[in-house]
Amino acid sequence: MKLHEVVDKLGLTVKAGQAGLDREVTGGYASDLLSDVIANAREGDIWVTLQVHENVVAVSLLSKVAAVIMVGGREPAADTALKAEAEGIPMLSTEMSTFETVALLSDLGIRGGRRLGT
């Protein structure tokens, strides 16, 4: 599924990286622990988090995620949005909780799994 379809279906707000909305989303990962994302997220995943600081961009680049969804009405800090835009990382925002967001992503057929010991 293309990222722009996820944005439309979930009513997400694009905060940075508009040019990357044509990326393919191949899975999902939810975590607020950056080292966990580095170790376990996979290329093409959509990452769901409440983190908003600039390190999110670095982790996104390392993990090669398709995009980041910031939950609970959080938005990327100004420096984070600028860095994400420069690096082409789509940063998305929603008022929904992590639980609600992941449930709706699952409803769209976006799956996680295949982690920890697999």
Image (tube, rainbow, N blue to C red):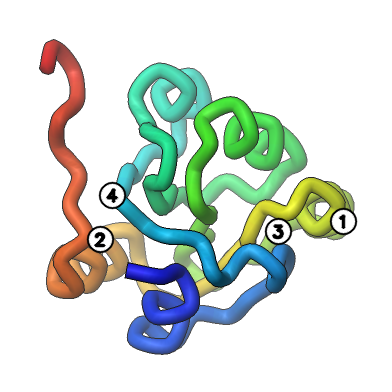
Question: Cα distance, mark 1 to mark 2?
Answer: 26 Å
* Mark 1: few/some/many CA within 10 Å (<14, 14-19, 20+): some
On the image, numbered disc 1 is attached to which residue? 82
Question: Cα distance, mark 3 to mark 4?
Answer: 22 Å
The reply to whether discs 2 and 4 touch (Cβ–Cβ < 8 Å) is no
On the image, numbered disc 3 is attached to which residue? 76
Question: Cα distance, mark 2 to mark 4?
Answer: 11 Å
Q: Earlier in the sequence, mark 3 or mark 4?
A: 4
Quarter of the image containing the C terminus?
Answer: top left
Q: Is residue 14 left or right of residue 6?
A: right
Q: Which secondary structure, mark 4?
A: strand
Return the x and y of residue 10 as percentages of the image width and height: 36, 82
On the image, numbered disc 2 is attached to which residue? 102
- Residue type marked 3: Pro
- Between residue 81 and residue 51, name the one nearer to us: 81
Q: Which secondary structure, mark 3?
A: loop
- Residue occupying the point 34% across, 45% down: 30
Question: Cα distance, mark 1 to mark 4?
Answer: 26 Å
Task: Judge whether 57 appears above or below 76 on screen.
Answer: above
Looking at the rendered image, the disc whose residue lies closer to the viewer, 2 or 4, is 4
- Residue occupying the point 34% across, 86% down: 9
Q: Is residue 37 left or right of residue 85?
A: left
Quarter of the image containing the N terminus?
Answer: bottom left
